[in-house]
Every structure is written in C-alpha cells, then in structure tokens.
Image: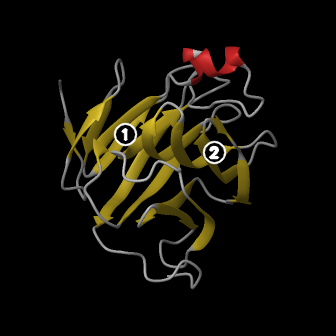
Amino acid sequence: MTTTRVPGLPFDLTPSPDSTWEVTDGVLSTTAHPKSDIFVDPSGTAATLASPALLNAATLLTAAPEGDFQFVAQVEVDFNATYDAGVLLIWVDEAHWGKLCFEYSPAGEPMVVSVVCRGVADDANAFVVDQNTVWLRVSRIGETFAYHASVDGETWNMIRYFTLGTGQQPLRFGFEAQAPTGPGCAVRFDQVGFVPERLADLRDGS
C-alpha cells in the first residue's frame, strides 16, 4: 500500500481508500469526498451505528508510538458547505476516536469544534475564528488526551481534556478531511510537528 511522508512527522502515513494526499513545498493537501464524515450520532440507534456513510471521510494515519506526545498543524480549509472541516484525528476503532476540527458552522463561520466518540459521539463547539487558518494541537498524556487551538501558533486555548476509555490499545493518529453536507472542499495542513514529550501544563496557554 502506498504511504506518504509528511515533513515534521518521523513516520510513514497510510491514506484511506480512494483518498489522495499530496505534499507540496512542505504543505500536506487533500480534497474531502462529497458527503463524507466521521460521526456516530449520539442518538445511538442501531441504524446510525451500522451506517458506513458516517465513517467515510478521507484520512491519512500512522501508528502512534508509545508514550506521551504533542501533534500540531496549521489547518486551512476552502469552506464550501456546512460542516466542511480539516481535522486532526486520533483513532482506536470505529467506536473509539476523537476529532479536533477547523469546521464551517451552520451560521457560516469558521469554528474550532471537537468530537469524542466512546460508542457514540458527542459534538462540542469551541470558538469562532475570524480567519481561514487556525493552529490545532493534540496531546497524549498517559491514557488521556488534550485538545488545544491557537490563532497564532503561540498562545493556546484548551478545548477539552478526555479519555477514550481504551487503555493501552493501539492508537493511530493523523489527518482527516470531511464535507458532510457538500460537494467537497480543499484542505491544507502546514507547519506540521510532532514532539514525543509530555505537555507540561494543560491550562497555561503554552
């Protein structure tokens, strides 16, 4: 299977079927599939949980090493339709995953949004961004995770702190592009970085 190496990450990443990812001048880019998403509605009906259409977004993932880490990227999205998004994704299996998204809201505003799935998903809006890029960071701290976002890549806002409840099960992480309601959107990830170190403080903005 074809793999991709992204500047800033010391791993090969594997694309999902039928997705195309390119690296140009250090920037990772893709186009989200039409009507694509990763979501398990919190109503939790059997039909919802079984629907492959809710787990069909383009992804580019790699196996996470053991130990704590910080994974960061500057995300830019050419928004076309509601819920278009560029995403940093952590993934154990179809029932246990998390998304930190730069997403187009129903009000037509770019927004930082987070989703955590433990059997079914939740959906939490963080803050509106008045530009077409934002910095996102995912940190693993023991068996927990922290999401942060920044408009300048220097001062960080904590979005959430959580666990997937899967202990030491193998984890994959990487990138996702989605367009749940529209024809697709271009997504770019720049300034990608990975540090195999514990985040020192969840709440001090660093």
Residue 61 to residue 150: above or below: above
On residue 103, which mark appears?
A: 2
Where is residue 57? Give x, y as percent. 49, 27
Q: Can residue 35 be seen in this view?
A: no
Looking at marks 2 and 1 on the same chain, the residue that comes earlier in the sequence is marked by 1
- Between the residue at mark 2 and the residue at mark 1, the CA separation in whole angstroms equals 16 Å
Residue at (48, 71) in percent of width and height: 153
For numbered disc 2, what is the local secondary structure?
strand
Where 21 sits versus 28, above or below? above
Q: Are marks 2 and 1 in contact (CB under 8 Å)?
A: no
Picture quarter containing residue 14? top left
Residue type indicated by callout 1:
Ser
Residue shown at the point (61%, 38%) measured from the top left? 79
Q: Residue at x 59, y 49 (%)?
A: 102
Residue 81 visible? The answer is yes
Viewer-side residue, 200 vs 37? 200
Q: Name the residue under label 1.
A: 29
Q: Residue at coordinates 33% horizontally, 40% vertically from top-left?
A: 61
Quadrant in which the N terminus is drawn: top left
Secondary structure category for the residue under label 1: strand
Q: x, y (%) of residue 178?
A: 54, 32
Check disc 2 and give the amino acid type. Glu
| Residue 181 falls in image quadrant | top right
Numbered disc in front, either 2 or 1: 2
Going by the picture, which residue comes out furthest to the right?
A: 107
